[in-house]
Image (cartoon, coloured by chain):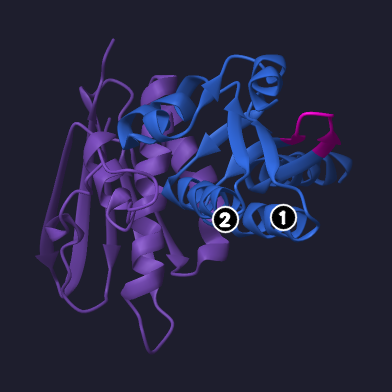
Chain colours: A blue, B purple
């Protein structure tokens, strides 16, 4: 009985990690650092877009998006990134990406997004480029 | 012994996590290498999102995923079937990936990923269903 409950719990946790996306915001003097962890897919991308749009509405125009803990991205994720980038550009702001690696980097490279978004090896490097 | 995994899901974007979990299980059974698995998951999301958006405009529908994931086979094969009206997603043109951010329409990016993330992809109409077949070759 207890084992069944434990198995179910572990399935549930695995399920959560698959659907999961978290966004952490940190204010630095040069820009707002938006740390996106987990998955940026067709389900979670609209949440990302909504959050960034709220920040833009609050008057933020300089962003560093930290993908250190991003495990997955699809065209829906790229589309959300592009939509927010256009909005930020429209306000004469800047959006820089940091820590793109692994499969996520491949998606950027294949799509040509690697050349349209300025990418940095670290948040620190992106921040110094934001000034 | 051949190992076939099959599962039917509602054509609803909320099912993406469950489908991802199912396909990961198939890929792990086959022993698909991590980089290829990532590509497979992207390709399947793109195909699934397309079906959710266009296959059943007026009613609810289903999507079937069938994997040949034999642990000693040379390639991993996944078929994605829907019962919507005939539509070949592969007929969509690739996007112009050299265009500037301002002018970019990324509508065709999904099908572009399906092509690029697989070794072979084909479409056929079978039993009144659209069947998209993705093949990934074993690399080691």
- Which residue is at 42% across, 40% downward? B41
Q: Which residue is at the far top?
A: B140
- Which residue is at 66% across, 15% downward? A125
Residue A17 versus residue B33 in the image, above or below: below
**In the shown orientation, is residue A8 left or right of residue B83?**
right
- Main SS of the magenta part reads strand
The N terminus of chain B - image quarter: top left
Marked residue nearer the N-terminal end (2 or 1): 1
Residue B4: give x, y in percent of width and height. Answer: 32, 43
Marks 2, 1 in one chain = yes
User: What's drawn in magenta, residue-wise?
Assistant: A25-34
Per the model, the C-alpha gap separating discs 2 and 1 is 8 Å
Label number found at residue B61 = none
The reply to whether residue B69 is in sight is no
Q: Nearer the viewer, residue B76 or A128?
A: A128
The reply to whether residue B14 is in sight is yes
Residue A36: give x, y in percent of width and height. Answer: 69, 37
- Which residue is at 68% across, 58% downward? A53
Disc 2 is attached to a residue of which chain? A
**In the shown orientation, is residue B113 left or right of residue A92?**
left
**In the shown orientation, is residue B29 left or right of residue A12?**
left
The C terminus of chain B - image quarter: top left
Q: Mark 1 = which residue?
A: A56
Q: Contact (CB < 8 A) between labels 2 and 1?
A: yes
Mark 1 Cα-neighbour bin, 10 Å: few <14, some 14–19, many ≥20: some
**In the shown orientation, is residue A17 left or right of residue A27?**
left
Q: Secondary structure at mark 1?
A: helix
Disc 1 is attached to a residue of which chain? A
- Asked whether residue A27 is drawn in magenta, I would say yes
Q: Nearer the viewer, residue B51 or A129?
A: A129
Residue B54 versus residue B24 in the image, above or below: below
Label number found at residue A87 = 2
């Amino acid at each position: 009985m207890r084992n069944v409950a434990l198995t179910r719990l572990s399935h549930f946790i695995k399920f959560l990690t698959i659907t999961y996306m978290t966004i952490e915001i940190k204010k630095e003097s040069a820009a707002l650092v938006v740390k996106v962890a987990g998955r940026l897919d067709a389900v979670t991308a609209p949440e990302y877009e909504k959050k960034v749009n709220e920040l833009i509405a609050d008057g933020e125009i300089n962003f560093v998006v930290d993908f250190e803990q991003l495990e997955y991205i699809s065209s829906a994720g790229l589309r959300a990134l592009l939509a927010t980038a256009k909005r930020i550009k429209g306000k004469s702001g800047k959006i820089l990406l940091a820590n793109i690696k692994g499969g996520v980097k491949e998606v950027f490279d294949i799509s040509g997004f690697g050349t349209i978004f300025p990418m940095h090896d670290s948040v620190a490097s992106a921040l110094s480029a934001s000034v | 012994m051949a190992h076939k995994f099959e599962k039917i899901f509602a054509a609803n974007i909320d099912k993406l996590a469950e489908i991802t979990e199912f396909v990961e299980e198939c890929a792990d059974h086959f022993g698909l290498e991590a980089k290829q698995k990532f590509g497979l998951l992207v390709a399947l999301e793109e195909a699934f999102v397309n079906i959710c958006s266009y296959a059943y405009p007026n009613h609810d529908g289903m999507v079937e995923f069938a994997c040949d994931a034999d642990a000693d086979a040379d390639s991993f094969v996944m078929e994605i079937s829907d019962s919507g009206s005939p539509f070949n997603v592969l007929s969509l043109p690739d996007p112009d990936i050299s265009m500037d951010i301002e002018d970019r329409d990324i509508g065709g990016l999904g099908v572009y990923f399906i092509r690029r993330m697989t070794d072979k992809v084909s479409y056929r109409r079978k039993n009144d269903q659209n069947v998209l077949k993705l093949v990934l070759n074993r690399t080691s």
